[in-house]
């Protein structure tokens, strides 16, 4: 069993920054590609970003490119999401997810995830 615990959400003004963390326990962290997804009220869960097991390969949704950065520390079993230049439309519950994949593989579909965190709320005020 794998447990994912997100932290770092909160309320921030437009243009501000937040860093989310996701601590993973229960299995070998480096066995999983790690993704961040988000879900706004009344909307479906959507892809934000993903990092391969190595961390060398990443992918971003067009809506966050150039503003968000995913990184992972395999020694600390933690994946991060640095969010800069936040906009009100970034308001959502952000979820960390893990998928067992090949070393350089990434994914972007929520239903492909093997494990999920409980989510952390990010609210951006205008």
Image (tube, grey):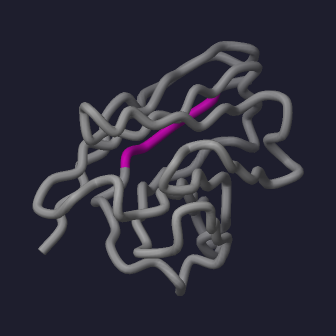
Whether residue 56 sits left or right of residue 9 in the image: it is right
List x then y, in percent, for residue 42.
Answer: 62, 72
Magenta residue span:
120-124
Q: Nearer the viewer, residue 10 or 95?
A: 95
Whether residue 98 sits left or right of residue 62 in the image: it is left
Position of 52 relative to 115 (above/below) = above
Snapshot quadrant of residue 21: top left
Q: Nearer the viewer, residue 60 or 17?
A: 60
Question: Dividing the image into 4 quarters, which one contains the C terminus?
Answer: top right
List x then y, in percent, for residue 93.
Answer: 48, 52
Snapshot quadrant of residue 84: top right
Queried whether the magenta region covers residue 122, the answer comes back as yes
**Residue at the image point whose x is 64% and y is 71% from the top:** 107
Position of 18 relative to 43 (above/below) = above
Queried whether the magenta region covers residue 68, the answer comes back as no
**Residue at the image point whose x is 76% and y is 30% from the top:** 87
**Residue at the image point whose x is 36% and y is 28% from the top:** 8
List x then y, in percent, for residue 62.
Answer: 88, 51
The number of numbered badges drawn on the structure is 0
Dominant secondary structure (helix, strand or loop) of the stretch shown in magenta: strand
> From this viewpoint, which residue is outermost toward the front?
103
Question: Dividing the image into 4 quarters, which one contains the N terminus?
Answer: bottom left
List x then y, in percent, for residue 75.
Answer: 27, 33
**Residue at the image point whose x is 66% and y is 67% from the top:** 46
> From this viewpoint, which residue is outermost toward the bottom?
111
């Amino acid at each position: 069993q794998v447990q994912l615990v997100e932290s770092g959400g909160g309320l921030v003004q437009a243009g501000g920054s937040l860093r989310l963390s996701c601590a993973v326990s229960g299995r070998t962290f480096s066995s999983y590609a790690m993704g961040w997804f988000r879900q706004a009220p009344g909307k479906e869960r959507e892809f934000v970003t993903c990092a391969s097991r190595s961390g060398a390969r990443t992918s971003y949704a067009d809506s966050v490119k150039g503003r968000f950065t995913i990184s992972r520390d395999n020694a600390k079993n933690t994946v991060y999401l640095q969010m800069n230049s936040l906009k009100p439309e970034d308001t959502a519950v952000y979820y960390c997810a893990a998928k067992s994949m090949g070393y350089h593989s990434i994914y972007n579909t929520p239903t492909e995830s093997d494990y999920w965190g409980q989510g952390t709320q990010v609210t951006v005020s205008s």
